[in-house]
Image (cartoon, rainbow, N blue to C red):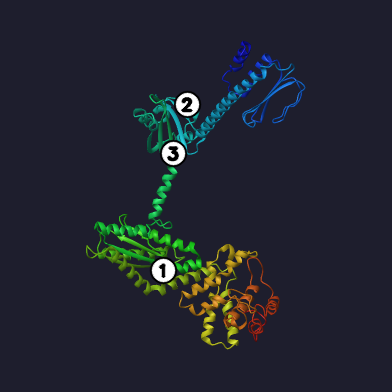
Amino acid sequence: MPDFELAVLYELSFQEPFVTVEELFEDLKTKLSRIFAARRVVLEVAGERVFHWGFGQEKVLPGRRLTSEYTVYEKILGEDLHMGRFWMEKVAPFQDCEPRLLDIYCRQVERTLRLINTKQELLSAQMRFREMIENAPMLAIHGFDSEGRILFWNRTAEKIYGFAKEEMLGMKVTPEHTGYEFYRQLQQVLNNPPLAGERQVLEGKVLNRFGQRQSVLSFVLPVGGRNRVDEFMRMDVDMSRYKLMEQELRFTSSHDHLTGLYNRNFFEREMMRLEASSADCGGIIVCDLDGLKLVNDTLGHSAGDRLLIQVAGILQGLFDKGDIVARVGGDEFAVLLTATGSAEATVAAERIKDSALQHNRVKPDLPLSLSVGFAAREKPHEKIHDLFVAADNNMSREKLHRSQSNRSAVVQTLARALEARDFITEGHADRLESMVVALARKLDIPEHRIHDLRLLAKFHDIGKVGLKDQILFKPDKLTPAETLAMRQHCAIGYHIAQASSDLVPIADWIYKHHEWWDGSGYPLGLSGENIPLECRILAIADAYDAMISDRPYRKGLPQEKVMAELLRCSGTQFDPGLVPLFLGVVVSPPGSENHPP
């Protein structure tokens, strides 16, 4: 190769360690214009960016093939334009060696582009990594040297420790600045630093500048060469939330979520533990909340939950911390007593009953009735599980003896609640009773059935105690969902009546008192004489009193309009044979002056 070509090749091959393509192109155009008298130089990179220098106004676009009236050298860089394209234009023809030299030079350009890409990708990766570290949402990361000087401090470290990055970077940690707790932990690492390739794992609490403690899991890593470690990175994972979740899970596994008492699983584990360890156990008390299902079915589960919470409060207040008080079933509670005798267990059971009575005197709105049974441990080797069975059987016997009185007390309370929430005019039940009795006697209904009809007039709407006030007192038209909820009062009233021996005879009538003569009523869609006669009588009297009485959202209607409405609905809503009789004996009874009763 001639000396001239060697000199040119040497100059072309010598390149600075360029960082950017811009720097490469500046070197490229300088060399090509001087050595080859280039008129125009174009470098297209990765089919996206185009660098242009020289004469010519033609717009250079990525991937576009260039044309020229002058001598042109064009070279694809890499495979399939993976690297880019090089294009050079000159006025004079190429000498024999020039295309060969340009080929060699283009290979050098390819290598340089690869190095630039590698550096930029590495730089981009470093920047992304640093951004990830800076904004790591769960890791408080800080770096420090062997003298305790802070070298790095990310945003999560700012949140956990309460110190801004500007306060910490370059600062040597002292107790006066960061507090003793942070200083002590850092010194703990510096006094016993991890070796190269090792790490320390620490778990404990950190104290921030505001005096708040947080549980953290810490990883300390050495940063530096194999033989010399003079920088460290500490990563703290905030475990406070997980510690709280762990505590909640531990609490949930052993406690009832509603009352906060121990649950059945914990209670049974304690019985087995005491049995296995031969520890002292004085006995077991079992309590059952009477009438819970009735309350749930009528007033809703929220009312039943309130009763359960009240029972839990009573039991917690009566027993020592050493005694295990648990909710062992839906309406059942149990107490595992520490060392005590039969007499003490009897006293404890009586204290529960007395506390329930005291509660009812203070809060008479809904009675709290508890059936209580107990079994004391008379022999040291008596099995604790057998005590539980005996106490439960004793409780069941007491519940059987008092079940009817308990249910009656709940029903009476519900009846009082209905009277308190009566949104119709005062005396509605009395007027209904008078009207249905008058029509029943006109029909020669036996006196014992008239007695039950009086009860129906008073208690037919008892199921409304289970409805929400916003539905019961709503002056506007009910939504479909509210209408469906309103219609549930028939079933609720049926359940209440079934729980009371006094109301059992009218339970079926309460359930059916909204059926229509034409079958379009509810809840069963009965029609005609399939509807009990007492329900047909009540339907007319109830509609009459509702229309003629004042409501919160309207005045009562004139009697003439009420009579016309009853006749219009005769045969659809009402029994057509009963409406004329009702108007005769109730609206215009013999000797009256056409005044309603």
Query: Separation of disc 1 and disc 2 at Cα?
Result: 68 Å
Residue drawn at x 53%, y 78% as measured from the top left: 508
Query: Separation of disc 3 and disc 2 at Cα?
Result: 21 Å
Determine which quarter of the picture holds residue 431: bottom right
In depth, the one of 111 and 521 nearer the eye is: 111
> What's the amino acid at mark 1?
Asp
> What's the amino acid at mark 2?
Leu
In the rendered image, the quadrant that contains the N terminus is top right
Q: Name the residue under label 1.
A: 290
- Identify the element where label 3 is drawn: strand
Q: Is residue 343 left or right of residue 428?
A: left
Query: Separation of disc 3 and disc 1 at Cα?
Result: 51 Å
In the rendered image, is residue 462 in sight? no
Residue drawn at x 33%, y 61% as measured from the top left: 335
**Badge 2 local density, few (<14 within 10 Å), some, or many (20+)?**
some
- Identify the element where label 2 is drawn: loop
In terms of sequence position, does the residue under pointer 3 or pointer 1 come before the other?
A: 3
Q: Name the residue under label 2.
A: 169
Determine which quarter of the picture holds residue 333: bottom left
**Badge 3 local density, few (<14 within 10 Å), some, or many (20+)?**
some
The numbered dot on residue 237 is: 3
